[in-house]
Image (spheres, rainbow, N blue to C red):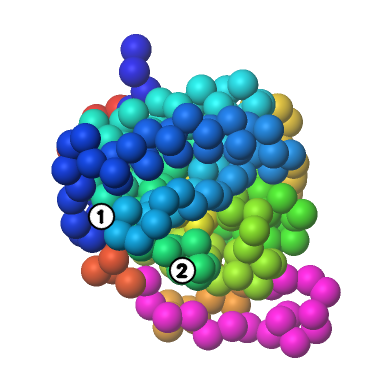
Amino acid sequence: TAAQMWPSCGESGDYESKSTYEANLRLLSSTLPKKAASSTTLFATDTVGNVPNVIFALALCRGDTNSSACEGCLVTAFQDGQEHCTNNKDAAVYYDSNPCMLRFSNQNFLATTVNEHILVIGSIESLMNFPKLLLFTLLNSTAQSAVNSSRRFTTSRLDVSSFPTLYCLMQCTPDLTADDCAACLRPYNQYTLKYMDGKKGGRVLGTRCTMRYETFPFFQGDPMLRIINLATEVPPNNNTMPIITANPAPQSQSPVEAPPPPEAQATIQELHGSEFV
């Protein structure tokens, strides 16, 4: 069966069938998957063509997958992007279980670290006795670990007394600095605490960083991080998020002012099983 996928179609124009842009996209689809799969970080970017038919592309596979699964996923992602964002010059493709994400565009998004095509997806199922402090601790610790990882990737498991066990995965594109990764994940934690408080699971997807948490293990291998102690408190909801610091710069250890979640830029969707409701 085909994996659940979530396309995000851009608004930077369309290309015509049998055009130079389409030929450039076809060329990218034949080279970028292998380029990413052969990278030690399972990540690659590329640029093909000349203005006005230039295409910028980014491919990232999850840090817990392997090279062959990465390549196969990205080959499919190019097909899905063209099928579900028909003739669209800008598209991003995310999956429920397939271990990759892809973006291609006629806009040079590679020149910035701006995170775009953001999707917020939450379970409609709630957990009883699920304090916000539990979710905050999970997000705080996992983000901190991912930011300071050389691959900008971490999987985690939270086990605290009688509360449900939680699992989490966070990843930034590995070309981001630790500070850029922190800046990318910081609003994700705000989204999650706002929209998924008490929910059994959820994720925030973007072209520069991703987050997912569940009450069941969904990643490969043992968690890279075990969390056994709760944070002392959840910061007040005043649009600050004093978490996610990049080592070793001392000045970055202080609370960092973060903007409120850019709700207009995020698509909020609820997920029940593998269906949107």
Q: Which sits in the foreground, 112 or 226?
A: 112
**Residue 102: x percent and y percent?**
44, 42
Q: Is residue 13 visible?
A: yes
Could you say where residue 3 lies in the image, as x and y percent from the top left?
A: 37, 23
The amino acid type found where label 2 is placed reads Val
Q: Position of residue 117 (x, y in %)?
A: 34, 56
Tell me the number on the disc at residue 72: none
Residue at the spot 45% in from the left edge and 49% down from the top edge: 48
Magenta segment main secondary structure = loop
Q: Is residue 32 above or below residue 142?
A: above
Q: Is residue 182 above or below residue 173?
A: below
Residue 27 lies in quadrant: top left
Residue 252 vs residue 249: left or right?
Answer: left
Which residue carries the number 2 mark?
A: 114
| Secondary structure under the numbered disc 2 in the rendered image | loop
Asked if residue 168 can be seen in this view, the reply is: no
The residue segment tinted magenta is 244-261
Residue 257 is a magenta residue? yes
Which residue corresponds to mark 1? 10
Q: Earlier in the sequence, mark 2 or mark 1?
A: 1
